[in-house]
Image (cartoon, rainbow, N blue to C red):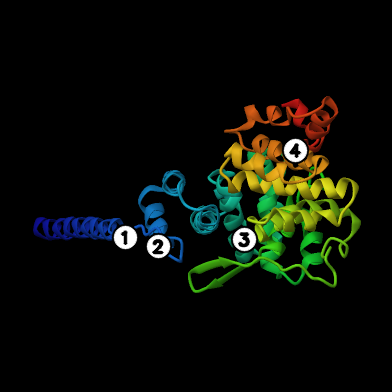
């Protein structure tokens, strides 16, 4: 009997040692996966390994540090990939790992993956996760919008916008609908593990599309995203950006120029000389609206929030007041 117990104990010990050896071998293999700055799959294999080794939170912190000097577009699409990996590992709990780094790219990838897996029934659950973690300003729900239109298809814009009614849209301008329009304007394409983006062309027969074709309740969001689309399409040509917004009047025009300022801020990595130069290329009223977009971009980022109001210290008192009014996209900024 003792001999049997001894043999059994030995077998158990060998099994434990064998499993431990397997884990050591597996971890060693994961640690050997290299990070490559130009990897067309945005280092998906590398970050998958880092998540297995260190967990999503620690790996995401390393991801942000590693990508600090990458180009703006590479930062954003790398974050898309990382967000999808968080979804695979953490599910909806991943909302507590992502943040607004690299223009909310992590959220975009996270929600696109979760909705692809769970369908539109996931939308309300994801919205609740956003509210629990961040309240209702809309940055988190913006990512849900990306996920929705990627799920239903870029050709189904109206359907995607209607599905946004399953989210908490604090104001018409930002939130889920802005995510839908941003994704519609700059759709993603995948080929294997390679992720790339295209930028929608201007339709000369219908130059204000899709904003003139959607319901009025969605148009504010559309015109704000039009400015961001114009910057993405012609970021080195302010005359073409101006032409895209110059077709508009009143508040819709302001929203368009705000979108340019907002996206330009992230593109130039908060380099004030370059951002002010961007806005100053436009006539004075449009420059004020563009500067309001800069101010909002600062306010939306906790690391830069303290300097947000000072961005509007320009020109006359009336211009400063207009800038601050336009920059209050959530209609609650004064409370902060």
Per the model, the C-alpha gap separating discs 2 and 4 is: 40 Å
Residue at figure coordinates x 71%, y 58% from the top left: 229
- Contact between marks 3 and 2 (CB within 8 A): the answer is no
**In terms of depth relative to the viewer, which is nearer, 52 or 285?**
285
- Contact between marks 2 and 1 (CB within 8 A): the answer is yes
Q: Residue 11 vs residue 150: left or right?
A: left
**In terms of depth relative to the viewer, which is nearer, 101 or 246?**
246
Q: Residue 74 vs residue 300: left or right?
A: left
The secondary element bearing badge 4 is classed as: helix
- Contact between marks 4 and 1 (CB within 8 A): the answer is no
Does residue 174 appear in the picture of this structure?
no
N-term-proximal mark, 2 vs 1: 1
Tell me which corner region of the image, top left, top right, bottom left or bottom right, holds residue 324: top right
Figure quadrant of the C terminus: top right
N-term-proximal mark, 1 vs 3: 1
- Contact between marks 3 and 4 (CB within 8 A): the answer is no
**Residue at which label 2 appears:** 45
Front position among marks 1 and 3: 1
Per the model, the C-alpha gap separating discs 1 and 3 is: 26 Å
**In terms of depth relative to the viewer, which is nearer, 161 or 260?**
260
Q: Position of residue 4 (x, y in %)?
A: 13, 60
**Residue at which label 3 appears:** 112
**Residue at which label 4 appears:** 292
Residue 33, numbered label: 1
The secondary element bearing badge 1 is classed as: loop
Q: Position of residue 161 (x, y in %)?
A: 79, 60
């Amino acid at each position: 009997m003792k001999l049997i117990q001894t043999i059994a104990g030995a077998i158990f010990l060998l099994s434990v040692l064998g499993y431990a050896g397997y884990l050591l071998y597996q971890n060693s293999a994961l640690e050997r996966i290299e990070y490559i700055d130009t990897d067309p799959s945005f280092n998906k294999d590398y970050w998958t390994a880092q998540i297995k080794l260190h967990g999503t939170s620690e790996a995401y912190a390393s991801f942000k540090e590693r990508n600090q000097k990458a180009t703006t577009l590479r930062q954003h699409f790398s974050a898309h990939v990382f967000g999808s990996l968080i979804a695979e590992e953490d599910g909806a709990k991943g909302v507590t790992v992502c943040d607004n780094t690299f223009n909310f790219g992590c959220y975009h990838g996270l929600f696109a993956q979760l909705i692809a897996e769970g369908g539109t029934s996931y939308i309300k659950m994801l919205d609740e996760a956003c509210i629990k973690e961040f309240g209702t300003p809309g940055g988190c729900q913006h990512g849900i919008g990306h996920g929705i239109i990627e799920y239903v298809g870029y050709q189904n814009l109206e359907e995607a916008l209607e599905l946004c009614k399953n989210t908490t849209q604090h104001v018409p301008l930002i939130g889920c609908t802005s995510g839908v329009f941003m994704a519609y304007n700059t759709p993603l394409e995948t080929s294997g593990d390679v992720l790339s983006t295209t930028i929608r062309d201007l339709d000369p027969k219908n130059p204000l599309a899709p904003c003139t074709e959607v319901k009025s309740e969605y148009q504010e969001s559309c015109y704000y995203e039009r400015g961001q689309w114009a910057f993405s399409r012609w970021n080195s040509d302010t005359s073409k950006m101006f032409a895209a917004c110059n077709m508009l009047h009143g508040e819709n025009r302001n929203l368009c120029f705000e979108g340019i300022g907002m996206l330009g801020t992230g593109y130039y990595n908060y380099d004030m000389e370059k951002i002010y130069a961007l806005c100053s290329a436009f006539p004075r009223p449009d420059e004020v609206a563009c500067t309001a977009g800069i101010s909002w971009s600062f306010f939306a980022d906790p690391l830069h929030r303290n300097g947000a109001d000072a961005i509007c210290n320009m020109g006359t008192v009336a211009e400063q007041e207009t800038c601050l009014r336009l920059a209050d996209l959530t209609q609650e900024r004064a409370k902060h």
